[in-house]
Amino acid sequence: MAPEFLPGNRLTLLNSGVEYFPALIAAINEARHDVHLESYIFEDDATGRAVVDAMTNAARRGVTVRVLVDGFGAPEFSDRLQPGLVSAGVQAMIYRPDIARFNLRRHRLRRLHRKLAVIDGEIAFVGGINIIDDLNGPHPMPPRHDYAVRVEGSLLTPIQLTLHRLWEMVLWAKLNRRDRLPKTSRHEPIPRGDQTAAFLIRDNIRHRRDIEEAYLEGIAAAEHEIILANAYFLPGRRFRRALRDAAGRGVRVIVLLQGRVEYRLMHYATQALYGKLLGAGIRIFEYQRSFLHAKVAVIDSYWATVGSSNIDPFSLLLAREANVVTRDAKFASELRHSLRQAMQTGARELPVDNWQQLAWHSRLLRWASYNLVRMLVGLAGYGGKH
């Protein structure tokens, strides 16, 4: 489905938790009517508790507060955080709580991977940042690198609708009539700026390929430069061909990827693709300074996207995702500058010759990992679709 670009928006790029969490908490603290939040991970750490405090304080002063988290991504939420939220008057639910971590049945793999929040129908947050401290990981390590966007204006309409639809769906599945949304719960957004943007989701009904198709259209139209930063990068054949074709027609294609090993299987599977990508003229940088969690791209310093969707089978075939796409030179240039700075200060470029001369056992490890991931995708019922 083609994205609907709406005028009249004000977009603010937020770099990592150091910018995102103060903005989110400030918006919740100023809420007058309602707060609605979705997150894949909601951790019981200093950051998670600060967000919980803001939501409980809002609920106690009469604001309607709703939070929905994923049962796989936030397995301890129901024991550690949900009771306190509910006792304060927050409506808190878990998406697919019946966790089976090693079950490959496709409905178990369809997770809520979005990171969304709407406050009073006036401010929204969309991006890749979970409710977890940027320093929640191996120590000592600099903060996790990620992005979100603060949205005001016309784009609030589809964002609110998306949040409300899933909330009602989960309520229906739980036979919960008490926490139904009133018909007047959606607010009419007011145009706030001059930026044009679209809100894209990936679900398992009408919007299965919307985010991927937006990427492919942007790549196909590129004339000068593509910069793509992704935490988990295992693109399908169409996506890889689109990047190679762009490089072949003279477009400068740069991919910033995870340099630290977080999930070994995915890490080595991704590296199995390096040889052909580098051979096609695509430049690859690995971010080493800390964990890279970004899911963003900039094309020709005009088209940009920020969201939750990785370029891998999990995001593109299974999970519920959400991205903002904008055609705005100011926003795109700001994101491009941030990515270039991250590459200069925290990443290393892979030399073509050294990578193509890897020892045979290193190449074997990477291709075995890639084929194992492909096999797992097939067992989940998506063989041949990625």
Image (cartoon, grey):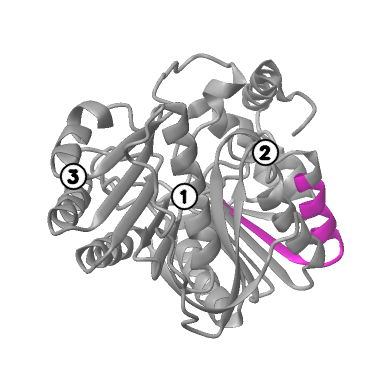
- Give the residue displayed 46% in from the left and 32% down from the top: 172
Indicate the secondary structure of the residue bearing disc 2: loop
Percent from the top left, x then y, of residue 260? 44, 40
Indicate the secondary structure of the residue bearing disc 3: loop
Reading the image, the residue beneath label 1 is 164
Q: Does label 3 or label 2 sit earlier along the sequence?
A: 3
- Give the residue displayed 87% in from the left and 64% down from the top: 249
Reading the image, the residue beneath label 3 is 89
Q: Which residues are magenta?
A: 239-256
Amino acid beneath label 2:
Ile
Farthest-out residue, bottom: 194
Q: Image quadrant of residue 252?
A: bottom right
Mark nearer the viewer, 3 or 2? 3
Q: Quadrant of the C terminus?
A: top right
Q: Quadrant of the N terminus?
A: bottom right
Reading the image, the residue beneath label 2 is 205
